[in-house]
Amino acid sequence: MNTGKKQVERVRILIASSHPLFAEGLRSLLVKRREPEASVVGIVSTIEEAIAALRTLNPDLIIVDYDDDRVNRDEFLARFVEGEGRLRVVLLSLKEGGSEAIVYDRRSMAASQIEDWLETWGGSETITHEISIPVEESLPRSEVSKRRDNMRHFIAAGLVVIGLMVLLILGNQRIALLPIAASRQAVPIDNLFRLQFMVIIFLFSLIVGLMIYSVIFFRRKAGDETDGPHIEGSSTLEVAWTIVPLGIVLAIAVIGSQALGRTLAADPKPLRVNVIGSQWAWRFEYPELGILSTEMILPVDKQALLILSSTDVIHSFWVPEFRVKQDALPGDAFERQLRITPDEVGEYKLRCAELCGRQHYSMESPVKVLSQEEFDAWVQANAPPPPGSEGEGANPPVGRGDKLTQQFACRSCHSVDGSALVGPTWKGLYGTEEQLANGTAILVDDAYLYESIRDPGVKITAGFQDLMPHTIAKDMTDEQIADVIEFIKSVK
Amino acid sequence: MSFFRSSLIRGLIGLVLGWIAGSVLTIIIRVLVGLPAWKEEPVLVGGAIVGTITFMLSTGVMNDWLQWMRGLETPGPGFNQPELTGVRKLMNVSYDHKVIGIQYGITSLVLLLTAGLFGLIFRTELAEPGLQFLTADQFNSLISLHGIVNIGGILLGVGAMSNFLVPLMIGANDMAFPRLNAFAYWINIPGIVMLLTTLLLGGVDAGWTGYPPLSANLGKVAFSMFFLGVYVIGLSSILGALNVITTTLRMRAPGMSLFRMPIFVWSALATALIALTVTQLIGLSFQMVLFERVFAMDFFNPAEGGNVLLFQHLFWFYSHPAVYVFVLTGLGVISELLPVFARKPLFGYKFVAMSSMAIALIGFLVWAHHMFTSGMASYLRVPFTYTTLLVAVPTGVKFFSWIATLWRGKISFQTPMLYVLGAISIFLLGGLSGPPNATVATDLHLHDTYYIVGHFHATMFGGYIFPFIAAIYYWFPKMTGRMYSERLGKISFWFILLGFYVQSLSQMQIGLLGMRRRIADYDPALGITTQQIMITIAAFAIGFGVLVFITNIIRSMRRGEVAVANPWRSRSPEWTLLPSPIPAHNYETPIEVVGEPYDYGLEGSVYARKQAPPTVTPASGPLPAPAPAD
């Protein structure tokens, strides 16, 4: 307690007030009570005098009249704080309700020295209102009673943690957190989710519970300016809270890797589906069945092996109910696989899950999981008719073209009913003269249509923009484009 | 000095003139090489590069170096003109690390507010299904800029805190390289200008991550400005980090061994080590896309043999450690402030210091967890699960140490402490939502959904924004000599905290239920419209809280109660040995360290004190007595 306490030298006091009663009254009080340790070296009544006196008289303490406008306390303090020497300023107010003396001290001291410092100025009721410090318990606490206290805190805090855990577990059960699981791959994934939610709830409750407890029961009591116990650390705890979390994360990593393995389990004879993403639609090819479709139709309880690719930018295949997700990449060497075994008949949606440009948000396709019988019926109905048979319809190229324009997403931008979408409508287009954006006119014939599909940006129709993806027809053969042209011709 | 002669205005004028000159130069080169004279994108890029150089020259920040190149001395105070105050001072080049720190801080807040505004705009759009007032392109640009401008703002804020605090905390009078420090600040301005020009050039719609081939789309010239802007801001990061490392390792006061530094300096050091070594990778990956766009170097064009996965590996090799750059400084602020407000030593100081280094190290090994669905080699995803989960261990050490610091303490709840406690709980929420992303199987469901959005917003806010606000409040009296308003501080805290909880939990839930990220509109059949409205309302609550915070700061700068030298009774040298505000050259008398930084509760212990003036004895022995007067 006595370290750092110096011999108290004669304290030089300056009084700053333009009210003679305040100044003189204070001076005589100080002289009466504090001589010879302190002496009043001057009385100033304006801020200029106060600043000058700081330099010439070099006081250790200035008592400033809080309410006096001529001694402008704010400006004075602003100047005061810019200096560097030791100095204390006490602001006193004589007004009613002024229950504080405000002290500004421009020097440094250790926390333990503040008590000493304050003690030298306590004791007088009329001049300063005491800033009282509760006397710390002078009897040393026994080790046993300290440990018993600690135990009680641990138990109480533990109850808070457990309470929080119970609340969160109940909440977790009540709030929907996952869509229905509709694939076999979803089973290990959902189990892993449930395990992780439990670990998260436990750890969150532990930390936040202890925080809540501390914030309530370890508050600083009003007026207590002392420090807390000097606890620097504990090697035991450090080891414990490194090893135990390490064990937990390793366990999760092992379990997680096993779950991944289960989602990758391969069926020997899956149904192959090529899934091709283009800006901004999906199409599906069933190479073994010869079917092209804009909807993904799958038989229940049979593994589908999806071969994912893109014609332009990166897209991503995701049906939330199936859980697993895989990006569809551009480039012939970059086909990627995803295995899905739907186990619930129903209708779902495939939603592109990688930002791919303007219409990314609506790049969705229906997914239908059918019973085996319904699936077989669908295959029958959609398999390509043998060439030359009745199934081809009255005008086979137009029929094929109709399907192709849907499968290759042309119809999301070109209407057949006259409405202007992103691109010009096809209704009545063939054979007319089209105004181009560069001012010239051109006849819409087979050659023009072919060029517009293979090389979309070369000629832009007036009133429209160069928005047709340049690679949209990358996978189309010339025969298929011929069918599309036949279809466009047929839209009158 | 008039407004128009300030470094900022001169720099911007130089930027415009240089941009024009660079454009003309590019046209000339194109003609000489045999290309058609005008093509928008290369001319824009040429202009921007030259404009950046002329900006830096016009601000005058390079003047001293240019003098030295000519073999001349640079006596005099250089750019530390003491007569400038307030906004004028901040608009001019200064070599004083405190001024630079505040310049970083204010620019950071401007960026964060701008990005936040973008967020409020698209959150309003997302409140209900259907596109109400934004087109899809506008939406995609806004979310991309929201991301990158926030990231720039965070990097600048990290620079603010490191630059302002590190010299003060180690007893130094400035950083090791004051002119480089100024340069690193000012080069951000052309970068920010370039990012903002994307708004005028049609926007960037590939997310802040800018994956090709989408970002190599030649129809969107704004991408060049996006890539160049980030490149230049990254350069600032690298140079600033260099300065922090050198300063920390070489300029500590006598007696301040590494394990006697304030804990914040440890986190600033760990952050700087990451930023110095890995920022180059985002520069590289963005430069490669830029070259693909401007020079047709088809790195990522599969039609010409390019590989889109290469970009992702290069990009994420920086962008994962980058998030530790964002949060380690914030976590350092938490560790720094808790002992002061709990009046107890930081529990396990050495372990907390080492945990920052461990997080930095492990952080280099986890990047591919951003790529689990990308089509990377399937088996290779598994080691990244292990390393990603491993980061939780040193992070856990921090959390447990913080709780142990609070335990049995004497906690008071001024605004900085409120924000620190809020930070701990929000960062905990964000961090704990991580393991499902770390295990590949669950990440297959979560990747590119709002769950991820919730995860990183919680970790960013808890690990950076809350501590940043806490730091501004805490050091406000030291920076300005005035106190902020406690009432406004508490109001802003509660709005931001409660808003943030609602936002994070709702985001995570709708992500699990099927809400993808980066989508301008969503399927009403998902049944998440209520949550979307709640998130939007929460976002506005957060915005309101931030507004109250900014108001508090601005008003208190002029009209706050004059502050004492050490209102927090902290043991750190900037509080115990410096007045508020701090004089230009920090410690007039050098200081020395004679104790531990966090010995609260130890009677009579001193951490740092002024060095005693040396007593000089001449080498030849004591001086002879003066000769008697004749």
Image (cartoon, coloured by chain):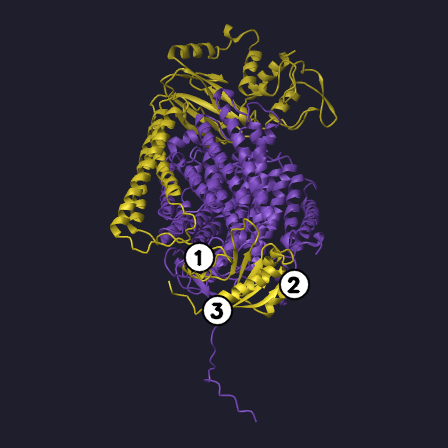
Residue that mark 2 sits on? A48
Image quarter where the N terminus of chain A lies is bottom left
Are the two marked residues, 3 and 2, in contact with CB atoms closer than 8 angstroms? Answer: no
Query: Please, what secondary structure does the residue beneath circle 2 have?
Result: helix
Q: Quadrant of residue A394?
A: top right
- Inspect the image, locate mark 3, and give the three-letter code of the amino acid beneath it: Glu
Q: Quadrant of residue B133?
A: top right
- Inspect the image, locate mark 2, and give the three-letter code of the amino acid beneath it: Glu
Label 3 vs label 1, nearer the camera: 3
Spot occupied by residue B560 in the image (x, y as percentages of width and height): 58, 49
Query: Please, what secondary structure does the residue beneath circle 1 have?
Result: loop
Spot occupied by residue B506 in the image (x, y as percentages of width and height): 47, 30
In this picture, residue A315 sits left or right of residue B221 = left
Q: Is residue A339 above or below residue A207?
A: above
Label 3 vs label 2, nearer the camera: 3
Spot occupied by residue A276 in the image (x, y as percentages of width and height): 49, 25
Q: Are marks 3 and 1 on the same chain?
A: no
Q: Which chain is purple?
A: B
* Residue appearing at x 26%, y 49% in the figure: A145
Residue that mark 1 sits on? B571
Label 1 vs label 2, nearer the camera: 2
Residue that mark 3 sits on? A37
Q: CA distance from mark 3 to mark 1?
A: 31 Å
Query: Please, what secondary structure does the residue beneath circle 3 have?
Result: loop
- Inspect the image, locate mark 1, and give the three-letter code of the amino acid beneath it: Arg
Give the letter of the chain under mark 2.
A
Q: CA distance from mark 3 to mark 2?
A: 28 Å
Q: Which mark is residue A410?
A: none
Give the letter of the chain under mark 1.
B
Whether residue A395 appears in this view of the structure is yes
* Crowd class of label 1 (few under 14; some 14 to 19; many from 20; radius 10 Å): many
Tell me the colour chain A is drawn in. yellow
